Amino acid sequence: MNDWRSILVIANETVEGTALHEAIHVRARNADADVLVVAPALNSRLRHWFSDEDDARRAAEARLTSCLDRLDDAGIAARGRVGDADPLQAIADALHLFSADEIVIATHTKSRSHWLTRNVVARARAKFGLPVLHVVVDAAHAREYVADAA
């Protein structure tokens, strides 16, 4: 008998990381999984201030499409959307439309990640009360790993 699992994935540039795709695959295996991938549309402060978000949304959409195609190739039916530039707001917005059992957050390494500087993973755990898996994608050194799960 298969379980039902709803997985909310939040990732931006890391959305194409192998470790992220493997983590999603492991969580979706042996379950009827509903996967929603949200790629926040990250923008510069200046462009945000001028409400010029078109380029950021297009870039996020392109990364999201690539991720969804790759998951589809692995046999995982997933859907996606471009989300708010603030990853916590993107999660909150997604949870209004999607009842997740767990959240997967993919970041760059600590030295490169604005999300880790802002303590997004710990804040998501505290704010949303769901299990959160943190996946680190280090494209510069071709390393990726699951940082922690809670």
Image (cartoon, rainbow, N blue to C red):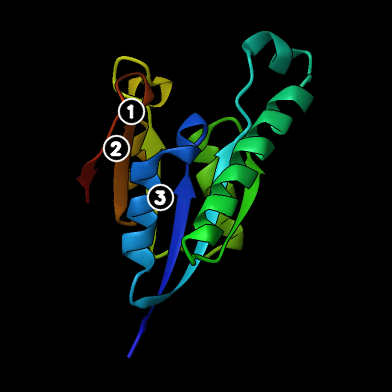
Q: Earlier in the sequence, mark 3 or mark 2?
A: 3
Residue 119 marker: 1
Q: Residue furthest front?
A: 73
What separation in Å lies between label 2 and label 1 (alpha carbons)? 6 Å
Q: Residue, x 37% and y 76% (percent of image)?
A: 31
Q: Residue, x 33% and y 63% (percent of image)?
A: 27
Residue behind mark 3: 21
What separation in Å lies between label 1 and label 3 (alpha carbons)? 23 Å
**Three-letter code, disc 1:** Asn
Q: Position of residue 62 (x, y in %)?
A: 67, 37
Is there a contact, CB below 8 Å, between mark 2 and mark 1?
yes
What separation in Å lies between label 3 and label 2 (alpha carbons)? 22 Å
Q: Is residue 133 left or right of residue 59?
A: left
Mark 2 Cα-neighbour bin, 10 Å: few <14, some 14–19, many ≥20: few
**Three-letter code, disc 3:** His
Q: Position of residue 146 (x, y in %)?
A: 24, 42
Q: Is residue 9 left or right of residue 124?
A: right
**Three-letter code, disc 2:** Ala
Q: Position of residue 63 (x, y in %)?
A: 60, 37
Q: Residue furthest bottom?
A: 1
Image height of 44 relative to 116, above or below: above
Instruction: Give the camera-side residue of 72 and 103.
Output: 72
Q: Position of residue 25 (x, y in %)?
A: 37, 60
Q: Residue, x 31% and y 27% (percent of image)?
A: 142
Is there a contact, CB below 8 Å, between mark 1 and mark 3?
no
For the residues carrying marks 1 and 3, which lies nearer the camera in this image? 3
Residue behind mark 2: 122
